[in-house]
């Protein structure tokens, strides 16, 4: 990482250090090839004219999966969770 920072120091305005993430703002042309997008669509058997429909379908699937995982996690964490509402304690009972 230090080598990367040193090599591109004139383009770097700050460094975030973390366990497993790096954030890069801008484009690294070595990682991008013009035909990747079209190759991906070809592999997914999606025509360019159908891209919007494809993206909406995939987004919906991801949202449903995330919601399902969240509900499952809540159900597995606790069957009854207390919530504070003003001075009254409200208990939410999960099935």
Image (cartoon, rainbow, N blue to C red):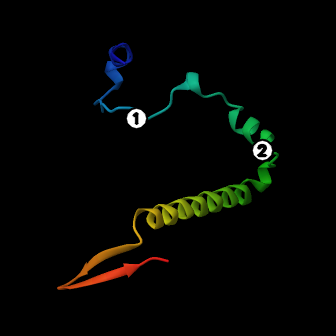
Badge 1 density bin: few <14, some 14–19, many ≥20, Cα 10 Å: few
Residue toward you, 84 or 17: 84
Residue toward you, 19 or 10: 19
Residue toward you, 63 or 44: 63
Badge 2 density bin: few <14, some 14–19, many ≥20, Cα 10 Å: few
Residue that mark 2 sits on: 44
Residue sitting at 32 percent across and 19 percent down? 9
- Check if mark 2's residue and mark 1's residue have beta carbons within 8 Å: no
Residue sitting at 35 percent across and 32 percent down? 19
Residue 57 in percent (x, y) is at 70, 60
Res. 87 mark: none
* For residue 62, side relative to residue 48 (left or right): left
Query: In the rendered view, would you say 11 is above or below 43?
Result: above
Q: Quadrant of the N terminus?
A: top left
Q: Of the residues under marks 2 and 1, which one precedes in the sequence?
A: 1
* For residue 9, side relative to residue 93 (left or right): left
Residue 49 in percent (x, y) is at 79, 54
Q: For residue 54, what is the image quadrant?
A: bottom right
* Element type at mark 1: loop
Query: In the rendered view, would you say 36 is above or below 86?
Result: above
* Element type at mark 2: loop
Residue sitting at 59 percent across and 59 percent down? 65
Residue 23 in percent (x, y) is at 40, 35
Single out the residue that lies furthest toward the bottom. 88
CA gap, disc 2 to disc 1? 28 Å
Q: For residue 63, what is the image quadrant?
A: bottom right
Residue that mark 1 sits on: 23
Query: In the rendered view, would you say 30 is above or below 72?
Result: above
* For residue 84, side relative to residue 80 (left or right): left
């Amino acid at each position: 990482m230090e080598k990367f920072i040193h090599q591109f120091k004139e383009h770097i305005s700050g460094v975030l250090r973390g366990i497993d993430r790096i954030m890069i703002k801008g484009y690294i042309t070595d990682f991008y090839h013009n035909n990747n997008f079209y190759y991906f669509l070809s592999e997914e058997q999606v025509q360019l004219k159908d891209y919007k429909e494809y993206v909406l379908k995939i987004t919906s699937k991801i949202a449903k999966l995330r919601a399902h995982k969240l509900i499952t996690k809540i159900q597995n964490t606790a069957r009854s969770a207390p919530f504070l509402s003003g001075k009254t304690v409200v208990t939410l009972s999960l099935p």
